[in-house]
Structure formats: C-alpha cells, structure tokens
Image (spheres, grey):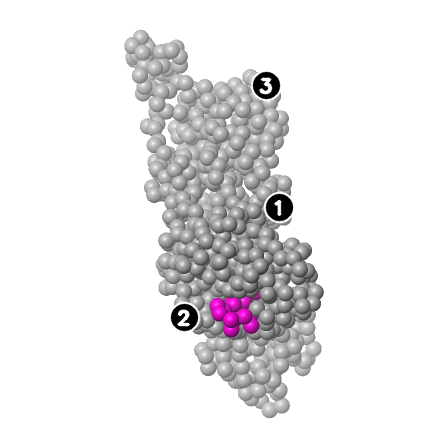
Amino acid sequence: MAFRRRSCIPAALAVFFLLLAGQSTAGDDQTAVIWGRHGDEGSLREACDTGHYNTVIISFYSVFGHGRYSLDLSGHDLRGVGNDIKHCQRKGIVVLLSIGGQGAHYSLPSSRSAADVADNLWNSFLAGRRKGVLRPFGNAAVDGIDFFIDRGSGDHYDELARKLYSYSNKGKGVMLTATPRCRFPDPRLEKALATGLFARIHVRMFGGDVNCTAAPRESWEKWAAAYPASQVYLGLVASSEQDPGYLSPKPLYYTLIMQITYTYCCNMRFMKMKALLPLAAMLMLLLATPATADGYVGQLAVFWGRHKEEGSLRQACDTGRYNIVVITFYSVFGYQHGRYGLDLSGHDVSTVGADIKYCQSKGVTVLLSIGGQGGEYSLPSSQSAADVADNLWNAYLGGRRAGVPRPFGDAVVDGIDFFIDQGGADHYEQLARQLHGRGVLLTATVRCSYPDSRMEAALATGVFARIHVRIFGDNQCTMFPKDAWEKWAAAYPRCTVFLTVVASPEQDEGYMFQKDLYYGVQQFIDKEPNYGGIAIWDRYYDKKANYSVTMAALGRRSWLVPLAMVLAVSSCLAGPATAAGKTGQMTVFWGRNKKEGTLKETCDTGLYTTVVISFYSVFGHGRYWGDLSGHDLRVIGADIKHCQSRNVFVFLSIGGGGKDYSLPTSQSAADVADNIWNAHMDGRRPGVFRPFGDAAVDGIDFFIDQGAPDHYDELARKLYSYNKMYRARTPVRLTATVRCAYPDPRMKKALDTKLFERIHVRFYDDAKCSYNHAGLAGVMAQWNKWTARYPGSNVYLGLAAANVPGKNDNVFIKQLYYDLLPNVQKAPNYGGIMLWDRFYDKQTGYGKTLPPSLSPSPWDFPAPARPTRVVSHLRLPRLSPACAAARRARTRAAPSQVNDRLVCEDTDLE
C-alpha cells in the first residue's frame, strides 16, 4: 500500500496548536504554529502563504532580564522578517513573538527587570517607537507576546504581563498568550495566568511528562476549567522524532479530539484540520474508510462502584453514554448465615437510591451485581441460596418485609447480575430459579473461556436474559476475542451476549483499542441475532479514557464529525492512492493448523494475492514429505487450481521449524530440486508421487530456519534452471522468508544468486527487530538493510496476525497504518505484507482490518497476468522442426511416455 500526498507544511514547522475550547467569539477556527526553530522550515511568508494557520508564533526572544535583549531564530535572515510579518498580517494572520524558550539566558530577578523587559518589548517589537531602541523587524509590529517560560523561577512574570497589558491604552493593543507545560498548574506561569490577562493558553501535551501523554484529556480539562475566560489550545508535536509525547493521528482523533468534541461541542469552534500534515493526511486516510454501513455498537453497559473517584451514579447516567449501569458489588452473602453486605468502594450509599431512580427516569437500566473478586461469598447449601434470594428480594428488589434493611431506600434495581469469580459453583442455579420465579431480570458476567465452570449450571437453567463475556484476563481470549464470543453466543442462543472489555491498558494486558475492537471483532459479530453490545469495565477508567465515547462515535451512522473533518482537509490532500509501482500485495502462510479452513476458502476471502503452502519439511536424505497439519491432501490439488483461477498465486514453502531437512551435498541439492520439480511443479517423470495430483504450484519459497546454509544456493540455481525449458513464462518462481536480523546466515548465499523475486522479512519471533520490542527505529534499521542489499527483489513486511502468548509480536493496526507502513513504503522495492498465518488471521480478522489498498483489488493494482498453464508436455511451445518430427514419431509409439527432455536437446526447445 502507498499513498500519494501533497506536502502541506514544511516538516520543520514542528509544533502546532489546536483550539479546542474556551469562551470565544464566532469566527473561523484557530490553528497556530510555532516558527523559528529550524533554518530549513522556510520563511515566515511561506508559512503564512500555506493558508493553514490563523496564528504564527515567532520563537524565541530568548535573552532578557539583565539588561541584555536578544532573539534566536535559528539562523533565519532577520532582514526579511519584518516584511514577512506585514505580509502575514495583511492575510489576516495573527503574528506573535514568544519569549523564553528552552535556553538558559532569561529571568526576571526583580520588579525593575520586569518593567525593563516590558519596555524593550514594547519599543523593539510592538507599537512603541522610542528613539535609540533597535527594532530587529523594522517598522513591523507583532500582534502580541507569548509567554513560553520553561526555565528558572516564576517570579515577576505577572508584573511583566500587567506592564505589557497596560500598553493597550497607548495605541495598538497587546495580545497576551501563554504556552505552559501540560501538568496543571505550571508553577512558572501560575501567577502570571492568575492575572486573567491572557487571551489564549497553549497547553503543551509533550515534553517528557508521562502523566500528560498517558492522560492528555484530563490535563486539558484541568486547564480549560481553570481558565474559562481564555481560549485553550491543544499543543502537539508534529513528528515522533521530536518528542516521546507525540500523538499519532489516529489515537489523537479517536481518543482525544473526538472526546473533547463530544463533551464540549457547545463551547468550542470546530478545527480547521488542513494545517496539520502529516496529521491531516493521516486523518483523511482514516476517515475515508469509516465503519461498515450496517455496523453498529449496540447497547453500552458500564460497571460502576469500583472507585470513589469515578463520580456518582447520577453523573454516570448523565453522560448519556450508557444504556445499562451495573452497580458492583453485593459481595457478602451465604458465607455466614445472616450476613449480607455491599462494597461500593467508599461511595455514599445514602445517595445511591435517589440516583437509581434518577437513572431509571432517563431510561437507563440499573442492575446490582453479586459476587465480585472478594472472598466473602458462597452458597454452601440450598437453604443459603433461598436465604440470599430472600435478602436480595427484600433489600434491593420489590420485596418490603419488615426488619430487612434497604441500603438504597425505596429504590428498586431492575435486575441482578451474577459475577461469580471465586469459590464453588454449587447452588447458584437454585438462586437463579428463586429470583426468576419472582420476575427478576437476570444477567451473568462470565470469564471468556467457555464454559465458565462456576456459572455453567446456573446458565443451564435458561433463565438468564443476558451474558457479559469478559474478553480480558485470559491470553487465549484476548488473542481470539471473536472466537470466544462466538462460543458463548452459540451455546446460549436465547441470551443476548455482550462483549465486556477493559477501558484502559492500565487495567489489563487484554486491553483492545476501540478501532481494533470495532473493525477487527465487532464487524464480524454484530449481525448475529443475539449480539447485544459492549460492556465496559469500569466507569472509573472509562471516565479517564473515554472508551465509551469513542465506541459510540464509531457506531454512529451519520459520521457528521468525520465528514466535517474530511471536508476541512480535502483541499490539502490528494487522498489515498496507490503510488506508481507500489502494489501493496498481501501474502499469507497456510497449512499450519487444520482449523484455518481449506485452501479454497482462504483464496475465496479475496484478501490475499499469494498463498504459501507450508511446509515441504522433509528432504535431503532421499526422503521427501510435507507437513500440512492434518489437512486432507486429496482436495488440495483442486484447491490450488481454484486459487489460480482467481489470480491468486500459490507457492510451496520448503523448510520450516522442523529438523528433518538439510542439504548435506551438492547431489542432495540436485535430488531435492528434481523431486520438487516432478512432484509439485510442471515435471511429470513417471514413478514420482504427486501429492497434489496434476496441480502445479507457481513457485517455491525458501523458509530455512534450522541447520546449515550449505547448498541452498545450488538448490535455487537448479530450480531456476527449469525455466530455460520455456519461453514466455516462468514456471519456477523463487521467494525467501527470512529472519529480520540482516543478514540471515542460512539464506545469504542463496539470496546472493539474485534469483529470488521476493523476500518476506519476518519482523516477529526476534526481539531485536520486532516492532513491540525494538520500536520503529529497530524495524527500519533492518528493513533498510534488506531493501538496499537486494534492490532487484520485492521486499515484504512479515507480520504476525495475532499475539502468541509470551511473545508480544503482533503490531496493532493503528501502529502499522500510521507508523510502520508510511516508512517502509519509501523503499522503491517495497512489495506488500506477509502474514503469519491464515489460522491466526482467521481468528483475529487482522487481514480484514488492514487498509483496503492492501487487498487484491482492480483499483489498487492490476492482477498479474497468469500464463496459460501447460498441463501436459504434449503442448510445449515452439519446438524446432527436427524435434517436432521426432516428437510426433515418439507420440505414435508411446503417447503416455512423451517427455520433450527425452526427445529434444535444450537448443531445440525454442
């Protein structure tokens, strides 16, 4: 896949700000950029001429406070800046001068120094014109001063602000802005901002503060709440090269901007995103492929009561996000006769009853969950089940027996959720029947591995309306959430089944990004008749991360916000396109698990341009055999021909992870080549067993992962030599699948033959160069070596389609789409993506969530022309006249034994 882009800003215009809230007047939305930090960013005039910015901030006035005043503009020619300022202002662009920065040559040691600096700024850069004061920008005057105080103490900056603001009465007003660090408050600017004189605040969501980059929305909200009279901007770095706090476009949009938009829609002006390339380009690509038209999130449920700082139950319902709120937990029961208790993590129980009724008035269903992760509950007998049912009925439901305390007063919850996570399974089915007999709505929250032994008997009663399947806390489930959900949905077709997810990666390793959940799992299950929706664990983390906001937004059919953003950026972008020469093909390995489905089914998905059968795994000692993990060999030949009829190439991979292959001698290399040719390709020597019948694979993949490297170069040459027998087609095509660390010692000699048209580089199974261990830099270091060393081969990015437990090799789609692909595609010999393997891809849907231009499509790349396959050697092309005569004679004598290699010399095969 590749995208053609028009560059919208110079790369060195490195920091930009988005206006996201504040009391503002009507008008165009604001995008500001800092200019002056790199000599290669272009002139100030050029920045303004892009048409992308409402404000440009010149940086920095970086020496002041001790009688010395100086600018640092990174080598820009000061003589042209003044005219550029006036040019920008004529175009309606506000030009500010930023004071401070990250140098160490400024401070305000006294009130007098604050007055002196204000005087210098006024007369050197603003509307003042006192004789004898140097004006670096000539008669141009900036529109205001930005405080970027990143060093020293915060003393006297409030006095500087007041003094500058006082000049507003002397002519042109002085606009004041501040660019603080993201953690609230910024001690260096706190006193200055308390003056209330600052029109704008640019909050820097970068700078090495983990708290801010981990929870940017919380940081932003604190600033917005503290300074409601100021416009608050979201400060971002434009590239991951600049700062670890870089927010890539997709999480910026889906986990921050969309949430702020959702919450502050009435107080904000919408953003003009076209200034934000590469951000805008990525947003355009992202939004060009929205959810499937008929996809939907379903209902959203949330678990409440696990953290006092999550806010009240009323506040949870007031968000408007949830259809169901589950109060957690009724966690003491049955263990000791007569003891029943709630654990709401310190919430004031006296207010919960009123909140329940309030939520119900808004149409929100409120459930009480019993059990949890404590250890003070069980049902040791049938009587205890009856007693607990009686207590629940009279304390929280419709009963009113005298003497039974009602913690929630006269409020009645809508039902009971069974969250039985410890102890035995006994008697919960009796508890369920007792409650169901009184008309109580019942739900269950179960572990994802089917069945949940503690709830199996209770669920078998058939009295539960809903099941919340927890897709976390279990590696097998987090790898294959779709598979886990389907088992539950199939087992309980009369129940509505919910996917239960954690709202933050802080909670569990099984955290799923919203887009990965929506596009990678939900699109496959939301059409099932008993799909219910998403349950979120829990309200506290959802409040922090706003997981539900993004899920709701993904499910909206209107897509109004993305549409508006697409319209905003469309003038800047050429849009997604396939660049010349970039095929973006996708290859998958098949044959490693019988549950992956047939080869025919794999090709019929339409996802892959090449399927690699794996493995021909026994060779080199006179024995030849394949290992296809129990697949029925009898049908594979027909499947190969079916795939080829769909323009899907089929290769056979030799080697693999076993230990039954090697090439001890040159003769063994020749023997193996002969066997491959006659058993799997166009050779037809009598007596050679053909496992796939008369089907012939398109080529051979070298997956040499153990043993010595000897003689594989000879094997490659021998296999490739069979192509000399043909004109206008290449029946033997060679590819290699190598380890990512360059060079792969087992394949170096073979690859140096330059006979391999493709190389699949496995960026997994090796911590030194897998993305999750080595990062983008580690991947690119090896990728660049492979692509540079073999410019005549197409190089594929090899990825794992799922996280194998203990390896953490899977690359999230967003990381692939926005980080890896834009970099690897720069190589002129980038070929596409290779996925390991079909079984994992079927389970996770990884291939389906890849960008559309990676899939075979006539819009993305022309299907390679498949030459007419020679089924019989009776139809070899263009024999010499002498050879043709000899051939006809031989055919009349023994038609079934005709082989042109036995009849004609190489020179006769024209």
* Residue 179 on the magenta segment: yes
Which of the numbered marks, if any, corresponds to residue 26? 2
**Residue placed under numbered mark 3 in the picture:** 665
Residue 72 visible in the current orientation: yes
SS under mark 1: helix
Instruction: Tell me the distance, in whole angstroms, between the alpha carbons under discs 3 and 1.
Output: 38 Å
Q: Against 366, is 889 above or below?
A: above
Q: Residue at x 60, y 42 (%)?
A: 778
**Which callout, 1 or 2, points at the residue further toward the start of the chain?**
2
**Residue placed under numbered mark 1 in the picture:** 773
Q: How far across and how far down the image is residue 454, in percent?
A: 60, 65
* Residue 703 on the magenta segment: no
**Which callout, 2 or 3, points at the residue further toward the start of the chain?**
2
Q: Quadrant of residue 769?
A: top right
Which quadrant is home to the C terminus? top left
SS under mark 2: loop
Residue 423 visible in the current orientation: no
Seen from the viewer's position, the closer of residues 279 and 627 is 279
Local packing at callout 1 (Cα closer than 10 Å; few below 14, some 14-19, many 20+) is: some
Kindly check if marks 2 and 3 are in contact, taking CB atoms under 8 A apart as contact. Answer: no
Q: Look at label 3 and name its amino acid.
A: Thr
Q: Residue at x 46, y 66 (%)?
A: 261
Local packing at callout 2 (Cα closer than 10 Å; few below 14, some 14-19, many 20+) is: few
Seen from the viewer's position, the closer of residues 899 and 716 is 716
Residue sticking out furthest to the front: 131
Q: Quadrant of residue 752?
A: top right
Q: Against 499, is 737 above or below?
A: above
Q: Which residues are magenta?
A: 165-185
Say which of marks 2 and 3 sits in front: 2
Instruction: Tell me the distance, in whole angstroms, between the alpha carbons under discs 1 and 2.
Output: 48 Å
**Which callout, 3 or 1, points at the residue further toward the start of the chain?**
3
